[in-house]
Image (tube, rainbow, N blue to C red):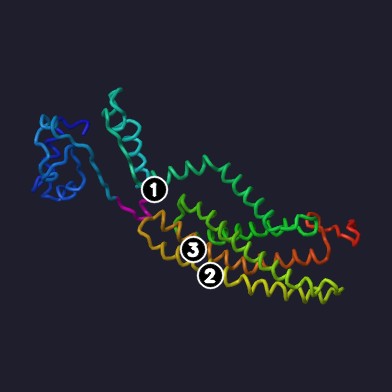
Amino acid sequence: LLADPAPAATLARAVAADGIDGGFTAVLLGGQLATQPPLQGGAAELPRNDTALNDTALSALLLNYFLDGSPARKSEVDAWEMRVSSLLLDGGMGGGGASGQGVADVRVSVRSNAVFNADIASATADTALLISVGIGLTSMFVCLFLSRDRSCLGARPALGGAAIGSVMLATAAAFGVCAGAGVKYNEMVSVALFVMLGVGVDDAFLFVRALEDVLAARQKERQHERADASSLEASLEADIGAALAAAGPSILLSSTTNAIAFAVSAYSPLPALRGFCTYSAAGMVADLCLQLTFFVAAAAIDERRRRQQRCAWAPCLMLDGAGGRRL
């Protein structure tokens, strides 16, 4: 358009019935031109000369380019998209016209996979510190929330770390499986970490609260008993089993519904959304498996520590009956 001495005539010829290529371009441009004021007859009434543009101006123009999306040409297509974006936004139509590089009063918007991925990568890099701080604050919140009792014996800092650790392990497993299966990684996939973090932490809360309810229900019948090591181990297994029976259905239901929802969305025609949903679905399955194995085992170890009167912050220290500490 910058080099065309008569852009109105060119557009009018392109949208004519026969057009410039037998009508193929006319069909495409029919829904891609907007004028001010709107033309009653559509694009076919576009002025045939530049003088008529004083009364009827072209207010918007949409250009679509359909490129080869095969994996073999991905790098070439991405380079072409970034080059076009640079020409249009940095020194082309969007240049503003003051320096002669662009056209005044023209706003250019470019939408492509390469530009979108570049914007996501730039935003992720700029907020990497905030993401790290957010994960750290989430870890602190989990550790505090899992400990109703803030005493040296009742706190559960290690269990909070196990809850975050299970999510990290699920993320690594999901990303490894998807990468091994050939699922394309894109910048949106990194957001899946926070989805799995929310679901995993919620599952941990459910199980710990169920365990505390079981312990509270059996506290009275055990408070006058002095059990040996074998009876403590047997009762521990029974308590963990009861807590898992209470919280297991909720954990299974939430993780399964999330996994199914992401798996269905993985059939989206949008590449970025398809990759994100595929990785998230695999993450939901991995998180479910780790919650029912790794985290439950970590909860059993932590509960054994409490029954052995070991300090939460230094398990090598045992509390005596008078509240003192001994190594």
Task: Give the mark toward the camera: 1 or 3.
Answer: 3
Q: Is there a contact, CB below 8 Å, between mark 1 and mark 3?
A: no
- The CA span between labels 3 and 2 is 14 Å
Badge number at residue 75: 1
Secondary structure state at the residue bearing disc 2: helix
Q: Is residue 226 left or right of residue 134?
A: right
Amino acid at the residue labelled 1? Ser
Q: Is residue 185 magenta?
A: no
Residues 252 and 175: in front is 252
Sequence-wise first label, 1 or 2: 1
Position of residue 303 measured from the top left corner of the image (x, y, whole percent): 75, 66
The disc labelled 2 sits on which kind of residue? Leu
Of the two numbered discs 3 and 2 in the rendering, the one whose residue sits closer to the viewer: 2
> Residue 1 sits in which quadrant?
top left
Which residue is depicted at the point 33% across and 30% down?
91
Q: How far apart, in angstroms, are the residues tagged by discs 1 and 3?
A: 27 Å
The residue that label 2 is drawn on is 253
In magenta, the rendered stretch is 67-75
